[in-house]
Amino acid sequence: MINRLTLAALGGAFLLTACTHDAPVEPETLVEAPTAPQPVTEAYTIRLFGADIGELTATTIGADIQVDYEYRNNGRGPTMAETIILGEDGLPTHWTIDGNTTFGNKVAETFALDDGTASWVDTTGPGSEPATEPRIYIAQNASPYALSVYAQALLADPDHTLPAWPAGALRLEALEDVTVDGGPEPIATTAYALTGKSLDPTYFLMDGEEQLFGLVSPRLLIVRKGYEDAEAQLTALAVRLASARYEAIQAATAHKFDGPLRIADVRIFDPVKKALTGPVSVRVEGTTIKAIEAANASHPDETVIDGKGGTLVPGLADMHGHVGQDDALLNIAAGVTLIRDMGNDNAKLAELIGKIGDGTLAGPRIVRNGFIEGKSPFNSNNGILVSSEEEAVAAVDWYADQGDYFQVKIYNSMNPAWVPAVVAEARKRGLGVAGHVPAFTNANAMIEAGYDEMTHINQVMLGWVLEEGEDTRTLLRLTALQRLPKIDLDSEQVRHTLDLMVANNVSIDPTYAIHEALLLSRNGEVQAGMADYVDHMPVGVQRDARAAWSNIETPEDDVAYAGAFDQITGTLKRMKDRGILILMGTDMGGSFTLHRELELYQKVGFTPAEILARATQEAADYVNLGGEIGSITPGKKADFFLVPGNPVEDMKAIKTIELVAKDGVVYFPSEIYPYFGIEPFTEVPQITSPAPAE
C-alpha cells in the first residue's frame, strides 16, 4: 500500500532522476532519495472462553494503517476493514471503516480532517465541526486496533486526555506493569484503562515500544499472535482490574445503616392483589423486612428515609441474563434484584456469585441455568460443549451434581437426536429443560421431546417459515424473520404449535425487547426502547442508540422487518390468550433494557399491574424463590425499589428510581450513575438518622 508520505518520497526521487539528464553533477553531490517506509504488520488472535474465533491484522506503512478484523461466535460476528491516516501530531486525519456489524448492519463510516474542519459520517448520519484545537475522533464501529491509535495519541498528551469528536473526551490511565507469559518469551507490558466512550473502561496492554499487545476482558481476549496461551493470565487480570473498580464503587455507594431502617410514607405494590396499598411505612432489620406499619410510624432507634408518597415495588427479575460483573451493579441501580442466567462461563459465574454473596460486589441474586451446546463450526462457547449423546447426558449430570442449577439450556448446534436423552436425564436429576431449537428441527419437535420452556420467540416462529435443510446456526435465525408477514397467525400450523405448548405446559421466554431492537431499529433514528434515557448516556451509547441492528437496504426490507415485529406481537397475544406462561427477560444485560421489556408487554394485552406481578412474585415463584423474595412482606428479604410515581397507572414510572434495597443494603442510583458517565435521573431521598444517645 502506498500512502501519501510514500508518494511524496517517490515524487522527490523522480525529480532528482529527471534533473540528471539535463545537468549532470559530480557523484559526491548527489542527494540520496528517501527510502520508502517498510510495512510493519501486527497480528492478533481473538479468543473467547478458550477458543480461537477470529483474527485482527494491522499493517502500517508510514502514517497509513490498514486493519482487517473479523470473528465468528455462535454463527455471527463483525467483519471490518479500516484505513487510518495519521497526521504529524499522531491524531487521525482520515479514517474509513467498511463492513458489517454482528447482526448484519452495513458499516460505511468516514472521518476527515481537512482545511480546518472535521467531518464524519456514521450510522447516525453526517456531522462536522471546526477544528479549533487538537481533538481525536471516536470511531463508532472501529476495530479494537483503535485502542492503539487512541493510546499513542493520549500518551503524547501531557494529561493523557483529549477532547473528542463527535462529543466528550477520551482519557487514558496507566494501571500497572504486567509481564505476560504464554508466548515465545516473557514480554513486559503496561495495563491501561481507556474511558470516555462507553459505560465502562476498556482495559488493554501496550508493550515497551508503546505498541498494542492486547485487549483484555473477563470473556473476550484479543492478544498478539504467539501469546494465545496467556489467556488464563490475561482474563484473570481483566477480572481483577474490573473487580477493583466495582469493589471501590460498592464501598462508596452501598449503605448499611446502623440499627433498623424505615421507608416512610409509601404505597406498596402488592403482586398478589395486583394493586397498591394505602400509605404505609416499611421497617427493615438487617436483611429482612420486619413490619409494615402506619405511614407515620416511628421509633427513636431508626434511620428514616422519606418516601414522600411514592411507590415501593418488589425487586424486578430479568428472566434471561448472561451476567458479568460489568452489568451486575447497573442492574441493582435499575431495581433488578434477581436474574436467571441462561448460560455463561461456569467458573467465572460461580466466582461472581461468591463475590455478590459476601458483599464484595453489588449484584442481583443469580439463578443458574446449565448451558449445553454441540460442537460445530458455528457453536457458541458458553457452558459445556459436547460431541455425542453420552457427553450431553454427562453434562446434565455435571450440572445436577453442583446442586444449584435450575435448568439445563439446549443450544443451536446440539444434535436434535440427543435431546430426548438429555431431557430424560434432566428429569431424573431434578432439572428443568429450556432452550433454543437446534438446527434442522423445529419447535414442535422440541416440545414433543420434553422441553419445559422455549427460549426466544423467534425460535418458535421460525418453524413456520423455514425450508427443510436451512441452517439456523447462522444469522438466518434472525434474517429469516423477514418471512413472518406471510404467515397467517390463525392458520393450522400456528394453532398446532400453540396447542402443543398448552397440552405440555410449556412456557416461553420471548425476549421481546431484543426483537424490537433487531427488527425496528433504523440508522439515524433513536431506538424506541432507548428514547426515555438515551440523553443521559455517554456519547458511545448515544450513537449506538441511533444505529440499526439488521441490514435494511431497501424499502421492502424495512416493511418486512417491521411486519415481522407485528407478527411477533400477534403471536404473543395469542399465547397470552391461551394461558401460556410468558416469562419476561432481556438477553441484553437487563438494567434499562428490562424496563423496556416490561413496558412492551402492554402491546400484548398485559396491564401494568399484571406485568409487575409477573416480573416480581410470579418470576420468583417460577425459580422456586417465592418464599424468600417477590413481595414486600414481613419475613421476606428486603429487596425493593422506590419510585416517585405510580407504575400501576404508568409503567414508565419504574424508570425513575430513587432508592434500591437488596438484602437490606440500600443504594441510591444517583450516586452510582456518575461512575458510568450517566447523568442521574433523580435526587437522593431525604434521610433522617437517629439522634445519638445522650
Image (cartoon, rainbow, N blue to C red):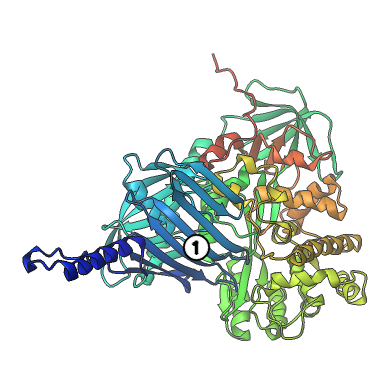
* x and y percentages locating residue 242 in the rendered image: 46, 51
Position of 669 with respect to 130 (left or right) is right
* x and y percentages locating residue 161 in the rendered image: 39, 41
Position of 367 with respect to 130 (left or right) is right
Position of 599 with respect to 82 (left or right) is right
Mark 1: amino acid: Arg
Question: Looking at the image, which residue is at 84% across and 53% down?
Answer: 603
Instruction: Name which quarter of the figure residue 478 lies in.
Output: bottom right
Residue 238 can be seen, yes or no: yes
Question: Looking at the image, which residue is at 33% across and 43% down?
Answer: 157
Q: Residues within 10 Å of mark 1 (few under 14, many from 20)?
A: some
**With respect to residue 338, does 67 lie above or below?**
below
Instruction: Name which quarter of the figure residue 213 lies in.
Output: bottom left
* x and y percentages locating residue 342 in the rendered image: 64, 64
Nearest the camera: 25 or 187?
Answer: 25
Residue 627 can be seen, yes or no: no
- Mark count: 1
Instruction: Name which quarter of the figure residue 685 lies in.
Output: top right
**With respect to residue 551, does 331 lie above or below?**
above
Q: Which residue is mark 1?
A: 219
Quadrant of the drawing holding the C terminus? top right
Nearest the camera: 5 or 660?
Answer: 5
* x and y percentages locating residue 456 in the rendered image: 73, 66
